[in-house]
Amino acid sequence: MRRPGGVRASAARRVLDLLRAEGTLSRVELAELTGLTAATITNTVRPLIADGLVRESGRDERPGRGQPRRLLRLAADAWHAVGIQVDRTTTTIVVLDFAGVRVAGASLPGTGGRGPEETVRALAAHVDALLDRAGVPRERVLGAALATHGPQDLERGMLLTAQPGPAWLEYPLTAALAERLGVPVLLENDASAAAFGEFWAGSPPTDTFGLIYMASGIGGGVIVDGEVYRGRASNAVEIGHVALAGGRAPCVCGGSGCAQAEAGPQAVVAKALADAGLAERLAVRGEPDGTLADFDRIARAWRAGDRDAAAMLERSARWIGRAAVTLVNLFDLDTVVLAGPAFTVTGTLYREHVAAELERRALSRALRRPQVLVSSNVDSAAAVGGALHVLRTMRIGAPRLADRGRA
Amino acid sequence: MRRPGGVRASAARRVLDLLRAEGTLSRVELAELTGLTAATITNTVRPLIADGLVRESGRDERPGRGQPRRLLRLAADAWHAVGIQVDRTTTTIVVLDFAGVRVAGASLPGTGGRGPEETVRALAAHVDALLDRAGVPRERVLGAALATHGPQDLERGMLLTAQPGPAWLEYPLTAALAERLGVPVLLENDASAAAFGEFWAGSPPTDTFGLIYMASGIGGGVIVDGEVYRGRASNAVEIGHVALAGGRAPCVCGGSGCAQAEAGPQAVVAKALADAGLAERLAVRGEPDGTLADFDRIARAWRAGDRDAAAMLERSARWIGRAAVTLVNLFDLDTVVLAGPAFTVTGTLYREHVAAELERRALSRALRRPQVLVSSNVDSAAAVGGALHVLRTMRIGAPRLADRGRA
DNA sequence: GGCCAATTATTAACCTGTTAAATTTAAGGT
DNA sequence: ACCTTAAATTTAACAGGTTAATAATTGGCC
C-alpha cells in the first residue's frame, strides 16, 4: 500500500502525510517510507520544524549502537480543521488537531425541513461552541469542510439539487458558512469524504477501494491509489441510483428501481410502516425527518431477535450487495467499506450480505477474494474525512510554508 | 480540454503528444498549449531534433511582422508501432508511424476455436507481412500492443480467463508474441485501448468520457482527464457484466441478466436463430465463430428496412443504453463513445437509443446534456489505441533519449 | 576514562527542469 | 538604410532533488 499521496506529491506533503498516518517516525523511517534520501528528509523537515508544524519528541529507545533516531511528530496544536457532515436527518461535527486527532465532536439532528440560511446559522453556532469548549483559538483553524450529498459544484460551493428543499439549490453554502465562521470552507461529497477519511484515519488493507455511504440516502466513493476518484466534476459514484434487476420503486431522481429507492433507509422504514401492526411493534413512527431514528429502531429490533425486522434489513442488504457488485466490476475493486450512520447498528449484518453477494457475483471473485469492511468510524467518517482533507490540502499560512504545503 | 497527459508529464512527452495530436506546431504554440515558457520549449525541442524525433518543416506563412514561427512536426519515419486487436470473431492489425499515421492495416478472422500458440504464430506472420509490405525495417519498430478482452494480467502479459478456450488461461501471450516478432509487446484491454485511441486519434469534445466497445462481447473504457482509468489492476469497467433490471439470461461470467448476455451480438444472433423463418430470411447461420458476420447480416437487413431486424437491434440498443446510464452515473461522465466492429453498420441506431436512455435517466441530464458519439474509427479504434499507447509510453532507444521518453 | 564501530544527521557539490530577463534573428514598414 | 515588431534563443538563477563526504552521538570494549 502506497500511503503517501500520488508519486508526485512534494516531499514536504508526503512527510506530513506519513507523520499524520503513523503518529511518530524517525527521519530514517521517513526516508525508507518515502523512498527519498536521508539528506532530502533532513532538508524537508528543517523548515517544517522552523515553521512549527513538526516537532522532535524523544528518541527511538531500541537498544543498539550509534546515534539513536530522533522521533518526529506533528505539532498537534499548530493547526486545526473542522469537518461537518450534514444530512436531512443527522449532523456530525468534528474538530481535528493538526495530527488528525479528534479534539471535539458533536452529533446533532439534521437539516430537517429547514432552509439553508437557518442551517448555516445553526451550524456556525455549534462550531463556535465546539471550538470554544475545546480551547481552539480561531486563528489556529485552517478551515472547515462541509460534507453532504451530491450533486454539487465544488468550485462555487453549492448544491446542484433541490434536495432537501428548493431553497438549497444553488444557495452559496460555503460562502455563507465561511463568512460566519471566519475561516475558508470546502464543499465535499459525503461519501467521497468518508472514503478519504477511512483511508487516512481508518485501516483499510489497500489503497484502492470503494465505499458505500448510507445515511438518509445512499452514496458511493472510490479511492484509487490513495486518491479520490472524482470524474468530470466530482459528482461520481452515484451508487444510490444504480438501477437493480427486479426493482421498480420510483426514485427522487425521476427513475425507478434505484438502489436507494429499493433498499435505502427510507425504503426500509416505508416497508415497516406499510404493515400497521409491524410499525406498532417496532415503534416506527414515520416522521419525515426521523428516518434514521426509525431505521435504528428496526435495527435494534433485529438485534433483539425480531424476525420481521431481520427480513427487512436482509432484503435491503442483498440489494446493496447487488449495487456493490456493479461498483466493484466497473471500478475494478476488491475491497468495499461500509460507512454512514445507517450502519451504526446494522454494520455487521450488511457486511455479511454484501460480502456474500460479492463472493457470488463479482467478476474478480476467482482472482482475489472480495473484502467487505465496516468503517472504523461508521458515523463520523465523512466529517473526519472532510477535516482531514482540509488539513492535507489547504495552504498553510506560515511564512516560509506558504507554498510548501501546496497541492 | 487538457490534451497533454497528466499535469506532471515531462516537457518532452507533452511536446511529442501535442505534435502527434496536432500534426504541426510552432514553438510559440507549443508554449501556449503546454503552459511552459518559450525557453523550456526551446530547450526541450533541441535534443528531440538532435535525436531525430522532431523536424523543422517550413514556417508559418501567415503574414505579419517579426520572425516567422518555424513549424515543427514529428519525424514520421523515426519509429513505428503495431496495434493488434484480437477477438474470437475478428482481428485488426494496424501499423502506425511515429506521427500516429496509419501506414498499413489488415482485417482478419478472429481466433475462432484455435489455441493461443497457433494464434500467436498466425498474428506474427501477418504482422511480418504487413511490415514488409509497408517497408518498415524491424529495428524502427518500437513495439506492439495486443488489445483483447479482460480480465488480464498486464504485468505478466496473460489472460486471466479461460475465454475463448481453456488453453488461453495464463498462456504467456506477450512473451510468445514478442519472441516471434523481435519487439516488445504490451497487453491491453480492448475497450480501454479503444478509448485511448479515440482520445488521441479521434475527436471527442472532452478529455473525460466513457466508451462502450462491442465486438463478440461488450467491454467498457473510461478516460478521465486524458488518462485511462485503470482501477486496482487494469481490469476496470466491465460494463458487459452490469446486471440490468428485467434481465435473466445466463452469462458466461456465472451471473445472469448481464448486459452482454441480454444485448450483446451473440444474444441478438441467438434471438434471430430462435425463429427459424426469421433466421432463414436474414441469412443468419449460427456458426460459432461467425457471430459478428451474422450480426452484420441482421444489421444490413435493418438498413434494408426489415422490421424484425430493427426490433431486435433496438431492443439491444435500449439495454446498452441502460448500462450506459449506470456507467455515466458511477463515473460522472457526460460523453459516451461507441466503438468496436459491432457498431460498423449499426452505430447510428445504437447512438440514437443510447442517447435517448441517457437523456431520460442519467442523473446529470439536467446539468449537462449527455452526448453519445460513434467512434471516428469504429472498427480499428482498439488497434490504433494500442499502437498509440506503444508510441506514447515505450522508452525510446535513441542515445540521449533513453530516459527522456519515459513514463 | 578513552577509543572504536555503528548509526544517524548534516553539509557540500552537483544535476535536471524550470522561469524571467536579456539578446539575437528575421521580416515588414517607412 | 533604418526602425519596429515578433519569434526564437541564450543566459543566469532557482527549486527540488540526488550522491558523497563529513559531523555528531551513542554503546561496547579495553
Image (tube, coloured by chain):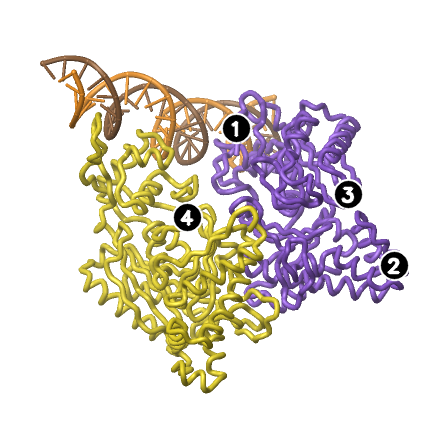
Chain colours: A purple, B yellow, C orange, D brown
Is C5 located above or below residue B292 in the figure?
Answer: above
Dot 3 or dot 1, earlier in sequence: 3
Closer to the eye: label 2 or 4: 4
Q: Amino acid at mark 3?
A: Gly
Write down the residue under mark 4: B205
A26 left or right of B17? right
Mark 4 secondary-structure assignment: loop
Tell me the CA gap for discs 1 and 4.
36 Å
- Spatial separation of the CA atoms under disc 3 and disc 4: 41 Å
Q: Where is mark 2, residue-wise? A: A282
Q: Are marks 1 and 2 in contact (CB under 8 Å)?
A: no
Q: Are marks 2 and 3 on the same chain?
A: yes
User: Which mark, residue A210?
Assistant: none
Measuring 56% from the left and 55% from the top, which residue is drawn there?
B362
| As drawn, B11 above or below A300 | above
Chain under disc 2: A
> Residue A226, position in %: x, y?
56, 46
> What residue does disc 3 label?
A112
Label 1 sits on a secondary structure element that is: loop
Q: Which label's residue is closer to the chain start, 2 or 3?
A: 3
Q: Residues within 10 Å of mark 1 (few under 14, many from 20)?
A: some
Please say whether residue B150 is visible from this viewpoint: yes
- Separation of residues labelled 2 and 4 (CA atoms): 54 Å
* Residue B135 horizontal side relative to residue A193, left or right: left
Do callouts 2 and 3 mark residues in contact (Cβ within 8 Å)? no
Q: Would you say the residues marked 1 and 4 are in contact, meaning their CB atoms lie under 8 Å apart?
A: no
Do the dots labelled 1 and 2 sit on one chain? yes
**Marks 2/3: CA distance?**
23 Å
Chain-order first, disc 1 or disc 2: 2
The numbered disc on residue A404 is 1
